[in-house]
Amino acid sequence: MSGRRIRLRAECEARYPRLFQFFACYLHQDWPVFHGSVDGAIDDAIAENPRALLGQIRAELGALLAATPDDTRLRAVLNDGIGVNVSFRKATAARAFAESVEQRLLSALGNRPAAIPSKPPL
């Protein structure tokens, strides 16, 4: 892993610790074996985490999306910084994925989002 990736990974883990663990625990290199699909991994992640933690994860994801308007940068943050082991062929696919996860979290929370902490862009 390059020095740039190591720094980005450390920064993401510090800024978004709950989101980092949420994705690291379910979308690691073996997710196809354990969950069968990305949707299956996200379903399991939501089902296996307490509601209060899901609210914090959703808030961190919302903050990441707000702080990272560039799709190419968001793809790098998701893959290299947070370690999401999903190949996004197009940068727009990374944003669509993140927004889909956010919507699923909102649905699990009953559409009551937690406050989004303000974070500067990565």
Image: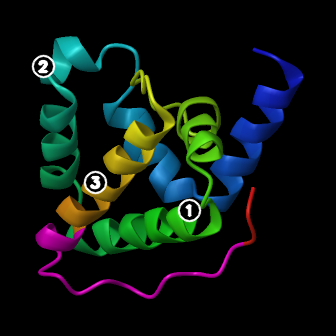
Residue shown at 48%/57% (left/top)?
A: 18
Residue shown at 15%/37% (left/top)?
A: 39
Up/down of 116 relative to 61, above or below: below
Q: Which picture quadrant has residue 42?
A: top left
Q: Which residue is mark 2?
A: 36
Query: The residue tagged with tag 3: helix, strand or loop?
Result: helix
Q: Is residue 117 magenta?
A: yes
Residue shown at 31%/83% (left/top)?
A: 113
Mark 3 vs 1, N-terminal side: 1
Question: How far apart are the two marked residues, 2 and 3, measured between alpha carbons?
Answer: 17 Å
Mark 2 vs 3, N-terminal side: 2
Query: The residue tagged with tag 2: helix, strand or loop?
Result: loop
Contact check, label 2 and label 1, Cβ < 8 Å: no
Where does residue 96 sit, x and y in percent of width and height? 34, 48
Q: Which mark is residue 101?
A: 3
Near mark 3 (Cα within 10 A), the count class, few <14, some 14-19 or many ≥20, is some
Near mark 1 (Cα within 10 A), the count class, few <14, some 14-19 or many ≥20, is many
- Where's the C terminus, which quadrant? bottom right
- The amino acid marked with disc number 1 is Leu
Where does residue 66 sit, x and y in percent of width and height? 56, 70
- Where's the N terminus, which quadrant? top right
- The amino acid marked with disc number 3 is Val
Query: The residue tagged with tag 1: helix, strand or loop?
Result: helix
Up/down of 27 relative to 13, above or below: above
Q: Which residue is mark 1?
A: 64
Which segment is the magenta one?
106-119
